[in-house]
Image: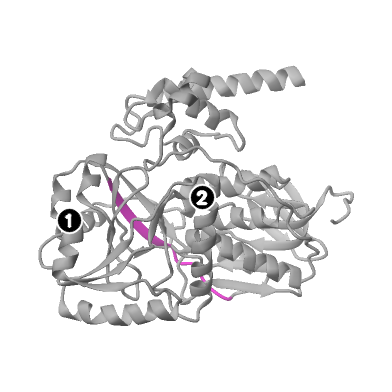
Amino acid sequence: MSEDGPGGPVYDVAIVGAGVVGTAIARELSGRGLRIALIDQADDVGAATSKANTAILHTGFDATPGTLESELVVRGHLLLREYATATGIPVEPVGALLVAWDEEQRDALPLLQDKAVANGYVRTRILDAAALYRLEPNLGSGAIAALEVPDECIICPWTTTLAYAREALAAGVDLRLQTKVHAVTPGQPHRLSTSNGELRADHLVNAAGLWSDEFDRLMGHDQFTVTPRRGELIVYDKAARALIGHILLPVPTARGKGVLVAPTVYGNVLLGPTAEDVTDKTDTRSSAAGLELLQDKGNRILPLLSDEEVTAVYTGLRAATEKADYQLHDHPEQRYVCVGGIRSTGLTASMAIAEHVTALLMAAGLHAPARAVVPAPRMPNIGEAYARPYQRSDLIAHDPEFGRIVCHCERVSRGEIRDALTGPLAALTLDGVRRRTRAMNGRCQGFYCGAAVRAMCDDQRAQQAGRNGTQS
C-alpha cells in the first residue's frame, strides 16, 4: 500500500467508472489489503449504460472466435451464474431461439452452430418449423427454422451492479460518486483533477464506458473512438409474459444482434433494441420513428404483442467503436489499463474482465495478495421467479413493513423502500429507488405511488440531516 503524502491518500488503484464493469473490477481487487478508489461522475453506481440494456446473460455462442470478447464472455457467463446463485441476483435460464424467416437465414444457422462450437459451446440444435412452433406457438407465421441455445439467460442488470459494489464497499473500497475527472497528470503517482479535488493513485483503470476514449486520450493515447449506439426498447405489461417462453432473436448481422423479443426477470416482455449511431453521449431520447420500427418488427415476430399494453419505453447507449473487439489495452509503463469499447456483452463478461484486468495490473507491478474470503452480499430479490417480500409470511411476521404495499403495480413494500434508502449503498434519488426495488416501474409509472415514495425519500433525507446536525 502506498504511503500518504501531503496531498492526502495515495490509492494503490483508482478505477474511473462505476458501471457494471468498473464495480466488478473494484470487487475483484477488494479484500487484498489494497487501497482502492472507485470514481464516477453520477450519483449512483450503474447509472449510465449499465442500467439500460437488454438484460441477457449470454453464453458467447455467437461471438467471433479467437477474440478477447469471446474468451471473456464465455468465462464471464460461468462466473456470473455462480455469483448470482450466491447473492440472489435474479437469473432465469429461459434459453434462446434464433428464428430464420427465409432460406438465406436458415442457411446461416449451421454456420452459427459451427461458431458456437468454436467458442466452446456445444448445446445448440437446429429446429425445423414444426419443432419451433411447438416451443413458441404464438410466433408469427412464416418462420421456417431456428437455432436453439438452451443456456441463454435473462438477468437483472441493476442487482448485478449493486451486488458488486456492495461487496467492494464491504471490503474497504472507497466509492466516490458525483466525482467527475477533468484532467490527469500521469506520474508516480498519477494525479487526477476532479470536481471534488485532487486524487492520487499508483495505478489507473479506465472503465469509463461511453467516455473511455476521452479518458484514454487524457493518458496520451488515441487507439479508438466511441460512437454511441442508441438502442430504443419497449417494455410490455406483465399480461404479455404468457405469450413467450424463450428469448426470440433474429439471425445476427454485422451491426449487432438486431431486434429481439424477450421475457424479463420482472415479469414483463421486452422488444428492441434499435441501433442508431449518434454523436451525443447523453442522448437517450426515444423517437417516434424508432418506436414505430420496433412495433412493426414486434408485430411480425409475435403478432399478439400488438394487443398488449405498453408499460414503458427507454433508451440505452452502447459504447460502440470502430473496432471489432473489446478495446482492452495494457500500458504497463504507465501502470494504466484501458477497458474501452465494452458493448452489450459487458454485463455477461464483467467478472471475467475483472479477473483479466487484475492480472494485467499485477504484471505491471501491483502487489496484490490473494483475495481474502469476502462474504458475498445477499441481495433483495426483485425478480418474479422466487418469492418477493410481500409473499413471505416469515419476513412479514418479523417486520410488518414488508407486508405494507406502496407500489401496487410492482408489489413493492415499505420495508423494501426503507431498506433501499438506509442500507448499504443507499439510494440517493428516485431512480436509485427504482433500480433497487422496482417501485414506480409498473403500469402506472409512479402515478399512484410516486408521491408516497417521494415522501419516504424526503423523510429519510430529513432524518439524515438531523443526524448530521447532531453529530456536528
- Position of the C terminus, as image quadrant, is top right
Q: Which residue is mark 2?
A: 85
Sort mark 1 into few (<14), some (14-19) or many (20+) by Cα contacts within 10 Å. many
User: Would residue 195 be visible to someone looking at this image?
Assistant: no
Q: Amino acid at mark 1?
A: Leu
Report the residue at 68% width, 65% height from top. 358
User: Would residue 73 be visible to someone looking at this image?
Assistant: yes
Report the residue at 23% width, 57% height from top. 294
Task: Mark 1 or mark 2: name the one nearer the start of the chain.
Answer: 2
- Disc 1, SS: loop
Above or below for 161 versus 471: below
What stretch of residues is rendered in magenta? 223-235
- Disc 2, SS: helix
Residue 302 is tagged as 1
Q: Amino acid at mark 2?
A: Thr
In three-dimensional space, the C-alpha distance between marks 1 and 2, rounded to whole angstroms, equals 32 Å
